[in-house]
Amino acid sequence: MTSVRFRRFGGVAALTPVFAALASKAVFAQEAVLPASANAHSVLHYFGAAIALGMIVIGASLGIGRLAAAAAEGIARQPAATTQITGAVNLPLFLLEGVAILAEVFALLVILMK
């Protein structure tokens, strides 16, 4: 049952950077010239960045959970191959963390540059 749940939500982890890029693309779009009072009330970029950050965290946590579950299952089946399994899991784990950190930095830049 758990493997079906992970497969169903695995697409969220892959699409999280896409959603973050779409949110930032809308924020960086050129705005029409509006009166100063209308620009002061424009806070939609904060909501977009908040949604992007939430999706980044959800996607990264699902990916890390999937990696950890597969590693634990592999180690439980063959305890003698613990070092090989751990070594094989570390590289994708670090890459996933790197993508999540970069996406969070981009989402925070959206907030800081506005």
Image: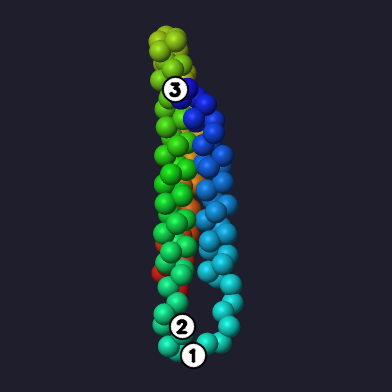
Marks 1 and 2, Cα distance to the nearest angstrom? 7 Å
- Tag 2–tag 3 contact (CB < 8 Å): no
Please determine whether, in this image, residue 36 is positioned above or below residue 23: below
- Tag 1–tag 2 contact (CB < 8 Å): yes
Residues 46 and 4: in front is 4
Residues 82 and 22: in front is 22
Callout 3 amino acid:
Ala
Q: Position of residue 91 (x, y in %)?
A: 49, 33
- The residue that label 1 is drawn on is 35
Q: Quadrant of the C terminus?
A: bottom left
Callout 2 amino acid:
Asn
Residue 39's disc is: 2
**Who comes first in sequence, dot 1 or dot 3?**
1
Please determine whether, in this image, residue 79 is positioned above or below residue 41: above
Residue 71's disc is: 3
Callout 1 amino acid:
Pro
Work out which residue is located at the far front of the displayed protein and give it.
Answer: 1
User: Residue at image x 44%, y 9%?
Assistant: 78
User: Residue at image x 43%, y 25%?
Assistant: 69
Please determine whether, in this image, residue 102 is positioned above or below residue 91: below
